[in-house]
Image (spheres, grey):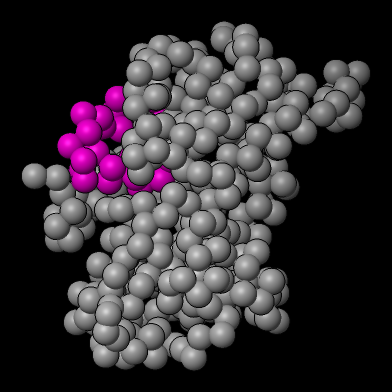
Amino acid sequence: MKHHWLAAVLPLGLVSPAFAWEPTKPIEIVVPFSAGGASDQMARTIQGIIQKQQFTKQPIIVVNKPAAGGAEGMLDIQKSAGDPHKLITTSSGIFMTPMATKLALNWTDYTPVAMLAQDSFLLWVNAKAPYKTAGDLMTAAKSANPPMKIGGTSSKREDNLLVFAMEKQGGTKFAYIPYTSGGQASTQLSGGHVEATTNNPAEDLANWRGGATRPLCVFAEQKMAYTEKVADGQSWADIPTCASQGLNVSYQMLRGMFMPGKVSKEQQAFYVDLFKKVSETPEWKDYLARNALAADYRDGEAFVSFLKADEAKHEKLMTEAGFMAK
């Protein structure tokens, strides 16, 4: 009974079973984007949870490597094969960057650890813009000369793909402006330098709350689930789907963690356990709700199966958009 009483009062991270391998020096999480974007926010949230809960004795260091549309960070992990003290937080770019650039890299060069969530994209406009719906914006885009500017993160990546889908659906042309992060895209939108962005919820939340930007619709088949009010007296669940406003475009993005290749099963097992514990904390659940992320934890074969299917889906989308490197 004494053992069970101790387990009940000790911090969660101190009652874990001993692992065959544990980190022996600081753990580096590479973010292949600039500070302020959704990937960066996620990495820093994870860093805070791990340290607060004492899931490891080693410090967690977040390093931003945004150059070349995220390729810098991805290549860094590829070159770090065998290093169990490095991780990368990544999204669909793990497929799209190599496809768009002929980068000699594939997600199978890495060691999959865990998928943590899926992220939505919204159509955002400046708070003072006249558009009430996606249909209003698309109508204005058809007569815009020069073409209407839409900002997003990187070229030939998720945001760019969404803008291509909008063009295809609406029979119009936009001027897509790539930035190094969603945070930068939001700043440009709030300053009136672009007419719209396709940011994730987390990337425009601060400016929405500050009265600088506002969402028109979510690029999803269903509305988001979170009903707590976040800005303008609205919840994420109050935002209509783009399809309901005549713009039939839907897309979601994985958010996951990988290690370099050529690490041991014991090293991989340590991090699978680590991120499983992170995903179960109240802090992580609060983060998901605050940023309207869909909880979707997968590891092992379930994560690998998702990656194989998602890669095939993105190859089709990239080919249709003409984004594949020739």
Quadrant assignment for the C terminus: top left
**Observer able to see residue 272:** no
Residue at position x 73%, y 30% from top? 51
Residue segment shown in magenta: 90-113
Up/down of 62 relative to 90, above or below: above
Extreme residue toward the left, this view: 326
Instruction: Provide residue 120's location: percent of width, then percent of height.
Output: 46, 62
Residue at position x 40%, y 24% from top? 77
Name the side, left or right, on which 277 lies relative to 243.
right
Name the side, left or right, on which 270 lies relative to 10.
left
Residue at position x 55%, y 63% from top? 187
Instruction: Provide residue 43's location: percent of width, then percent of height.
Output: 58, 39
All told, the count of numbered labels is: 0
Q: Nearer the viewer, residue 2 or 205?
A: 205
- For residue 158, which quarter of the picture? bottom left
Magenta span contains residue 14: no
